[in-house]
Amino acid sequence: MGERKKVCKEIVKACEEFGFFKVINHGVPVDVISKMEEESLSFFSKSEAQKKQAGPANPYGYGSKTIGFNGDMGEVEYILLNTNPNTIAHYSNTISNNNPTKFRCAVNWYIEAVKRLACEILDLMANGLSVSDTNFFSRLIKDSDNDSLFRLNHYPNTKDMDTSSPTPPPPMDVAHYKVGFGEHSDPQILTLLRSNDVGGLQISLEDKVWVPVPPDPFAFWVNVGDVLQALTNGRFLSVRHRALVTNNNNNNKTRMSMAYFAAPPLNAWT
Ligand SMILES: O=C(O)CCC(=O)C(=O)O
Ligand SMILES: [Fe+2]
């Protein structure tokens, strides 16, 4: 079997078993990632009052603790954007009032690079599934009306949390954690997730068995989303995952992640 064919088969197997896999040597330039991370860090380091100028997230913009429309809460603050360049340009003004152009460019470069990677992965998947039209999935996210999203997440350290509860927390190395981002699956086709070197992400393979995902700032994790599960008639699993805030890391570094959610146009006929 040729090398490419082998990769296609392995990707399909991972999507059937886990709906989740890791990509290394992905071709997204290091400086594109580090510029995006720099922008993210500089935004989240601002004062609460400054950050709130870019909110509330409805659904785009800055949000803190409330996630989505179902009243979900978590120890997370985030910026959610549509990947449409007009939306990015609009929000850049309040997200980075000292240099909106720098922020906008960092986001656009990052999105351009991860979108290319997502398309390549989707073509490999189609190939592995022996779909005759191998660009079928990637065409959906290349459509100019695609509804793809980009999200920057920041999780505080437990040291910053309220520990004034009457019952003392269990020893730090046991189950002392808070939910940063509660259990969910991503609704779109595919998610490319990249984080700094602070852990917290977990995936659930069987019911309620949580497996920690080691952080790797040089890699991308790929999540199969609900749309791809549906497009493959359930052959691919859309992976359930969550992010916890722990204080296992003894330095003060906090987790930052960035997620690109590749989605078809809202009115796509699939
Ligand atoms: O921060 C993480 O690792 C998880 C983020 C996530 O699941 C999401 O943004 O949908
Ligand atoms: Fe997610």
Image (cartoon, rainbow, N blue to C red):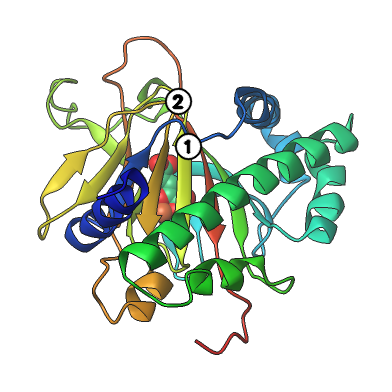
Q: Which residue is mark 2?
A: 217
Residue drawn at the location 51% of the way across and 53% of the way down: 120
Q: Which secondary structure lies at badge 1?
A: strand
Q: Is residue 128 visible?
A: yes
Residue 230 image-quadrant placement: bottom left
Of all residues, the one furthest to the bottom in this rendering is: 269
Q: Hey, which quadrant is residue 95 in on the image?
A: top right
Is 205 in front, or is 218? 218
Q: Amino acid at mark 1?
A: Arg
Give the residue pinned by disc 1.
194
Q: Position of residue 68 (x, y in %)?
A: 51, 64
* For residue 143, side relative to residue 204 (left or right): right
Residue 82: percent from the left, percent from the top? 68, 60
Q: Residues within 10 Å of mark 2 (few under 14, many from 20)?
A: some
Report x, y in % for residue 191: 46, 54
Pointer 1 and pointer 2: residues touching (CB < 8 Å)? yes
Q: Amino acid at mark 2?
A: Pro
Q: Visible in this render: residue 65?
A: no
Image point (44%, 29%), residue name: 255
